Amino acid sequence: MNAPDLKSTGASAQNAASANSAIEHTAQQRKNYYSSIKDQQLFPLWEVLHSLVPQQPNSPCVPAHWAYANVRPKLIESGSLITAQEAIRRVLILENPGLPGSCAITQSLYAGLQLILPGEVAPAHRHTQSALRFIVEGEGAYTAVNGERTTMREGDFIITPSWTWHDHGHEQQDPVVWLDGLDIPMIRFFDAGFAENAARDSQIVERAEGATDSLYSHGLAPVKPRHQSATSPIFNYPYTRTREVLYRLSREEAPDSKHGYLLKYVNPLTGHWAIPTMATFMQWCPKGFASQPSQSTDGRIFSVVEGSGIAKIKSAQGQEHSFSLAPRDVFVVPSWANLELIAHQDLIVFSYSDRPVQEAMGVWRERQ
Ligand code: 1HN
């Protein structure tokens, strides 16, 4: 249909002008009305409906990359400025540039790089936030959970379940660095945070190292578990074993077109995710592999373990990023962004996300 030519007659020009002034009048009336209800904490839904219920995820979280070569010198420098004891936890927070002031890497998750030096202790405490530790550099530090220590080695995935006592220490040679992943923003959202300091800095060791994990890591479990918890009873999933399982998988099948060889860490008692609020994965893209784009509603945080390559990320708003990946780098892929992984050398990456929570709510989606 053709638009009417408003300039063709004087009458229709006049009609248009009066229509415009009517629109302006209504707009002004509405504005006055909005001002009049503001003091009562009342707001018109019709002005914000589309942004409250977007047609697809439109996260303020942006793709971001922390090259370890840049972060490491600053992290080591922090070691000469403050002790682990004084800091409680000597961590550089990885904050998403799209979420300033939030201490969050995605809307629901926290990430930081923690440094512990030989001879240091990070004192015992507990909180309702769950934590994962992904060991990035060094070995020989330990973390203690509920009276049992486990030694940290590169690539190990270690769990601190909600409300368990935990402290870290280091009695060996070199600096140890790990990635902390916590559900801090999620717990903040629910206003469900509690925390407590222990009476002593280091917990008394109550069991031999490996005692708990050996009960649950062989397809067997005590019929009466010591603790009932939604979190896996295994608290260290060692990299040597994870790497072996990745290799076994590669002997069984071709790589998935989107993910290469992808493993999830599971709670052996339930078969579900190891941590109830955070899904954790290890993934191997063989040398020369270029993935199809993957897209899901869970924002994903990655830590490069081995190899090199490129992460091509296209945000839900259409901005494109290309991050060159080296071991120990961290990068974040926001909800509903497209990720393509290109492996120049065999690329092994750990990742975590809030997928278990989205699944429990029935809202998790991926692009088929
Ligand atoms: C925490 O307890 C640890 O135990 C790490 O290593 C990071 C960030 C915020 C609050 C508590 C840890 C943390 C944290």
Image (spheres, grey):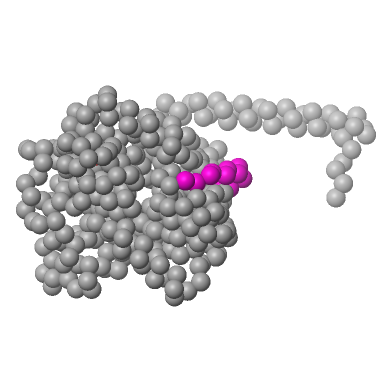
Q: Nearer the viewer, residue 339 or 168?
A: 168
Q: Is residue 352 above or below residue 51?
A: below
Would you say residue 108 sits in the magenta stretch? Answer: no
Left or right of 51 on screen, residue 358: left
Q: Position of residue 350 (x, y in %)?
A: 39, 54
Q: Nearer the viewer, residue 20 or 147?
A: 147
Q: How many marks?
A: 0
Q: Nearer the viewer, residue 190 or 183?
A: 183
Q: Position of residue 14 (x, y in %)?
A: 84, 29
The quarter of the displayed image where residue 189 is located: top left
Q: Is residue 287 visible?
A: yes
**Residue under the image location 40 percent in, 51 percent down:** 305
**Residue extending furthest toward the front:** 173
**Residue under the image location 32 percent in, 31 percent down:** 76
**Residue extending furthest toward the bottom:** 252
Q: Is residue 131 visible?
A: no
**Residue under the image location 16 percent in, 67 percent down:** 215
Magenta residue span:
313-326
Q: Position of residue 317 (x, y in %)?
A: 59, 44
The quarter of the displayed image where residue 360 is located: bottom left
Q: Nearer the viewer, residue 254 or 28?
A: 254
Q: Is residue 203 above or below residue 206?
A: above
